[in-house]
């Protein structure tokens, strides 16, 4: 008789915040560019055989906040560009054979 219990917990959290404020007065040109990339990958794999319990939990949270404020007075040109990319990939694989209980939450 063999009994094995395996718990695999993977948590990934990435937070990206960018604030752009541009104020200009009296004949001017202002250009502000902000780019933020946030990539989060989490992979949890558990394989087990013969009277076992396996629980695999994967949580991924990706938050991207971008604020762009431009105030201008009296003959001006202002250009504000904000690009934000947020990619989150999570993969949870659980394989069990022969009298097993498995819970997978992603």
Image (spheres, rainbow, N blue to C red):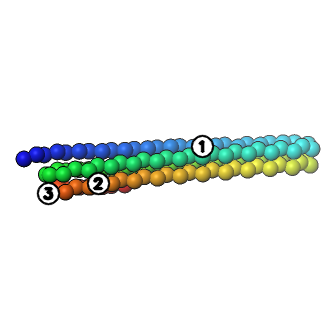
**40 sits to left or right of 47:** right
| C-alpha span from label 2 to label 1 | 35 Å
Farthest left residue? 1
Q: Seen in the image, is 88 located left or right of residue 21?
A: left
> Residue visible at 23% across and 45% down?
6
The dot on residue 3 is none
User: Of helix, strand and loop, which one carries label 1?
Assistant: strand
Q: Residues within 10 Å of mark 3 (few under 14, many from 20)?
A: few
Q: Position of residue 60 (x, y in %)?
A: 43, 49
**Can you identify the residue that label 1 sits on?**
17
Q: CA distance from mark 1 to mark 3?
A: 48 Å
Q: Residue at x 76, y 44 (%)?
A: 32
Q: Quadrant of residue 7?
A: top left
Residue position for label 2: 94
CA gap between label 3 and label 2 equals: 14 Å
Q: x, y (%) of residue 53?
A: 19, 50
In primary-sequence order, the first of circles 1 and 3 is 1
Q: In front: 55, or 43?
A: 43
Quadrant that contains the C terminus = bottom left
User: On the picture, is 98 further left or further right than 90?
Assistant: left
Q: Earlier in the sequence, mark 3 or mark 2?
A: 2
Q: Residue at x 46, y 53 (%)?
A: 89
Secondary structure under badge 2?
strand
Instruction: Mark 1 vs mark 3: give the one in front.
Output: 3
Q: How many marks?
A: 3
Query: How far from the left and from the top, in percent, is residue 50?
Result: 14, 52
- The image shows residue 73 at horizontal and vertical percentages of 87, 47
| Residue where numbered disc 3 is placed | 99
Label 1: how many Cα within 10 Å (few below 14, some 14–19, many 20+): few
* Residue visible at 56% across and 46% down in the picture: 38
- Mark with earlier residue (2, 1): 1
């Amino acid at each position: 008789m063999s009994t094995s219990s395996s718990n695999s917990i993977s948590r990934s959290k990435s937070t990206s915040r960018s604030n752009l404020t541009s104020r200009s007065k009296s004949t001017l040109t202002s250009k502000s560019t902000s780019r933020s990339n946030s990539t989060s990958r989490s992979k949890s794999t558990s394989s087990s055989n013969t009277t076992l319990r396996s629980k695999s939990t994967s949580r991924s949270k990706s938050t991207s906040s971008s604020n762009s404020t431009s105030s201008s007075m009296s003959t001006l040109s202002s250009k504000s560009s904000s690009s934000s990319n947020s990619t989150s990939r999570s993969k949870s694989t659980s394989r069990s054979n022969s009298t097993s209980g498995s819970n997978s939450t992603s």
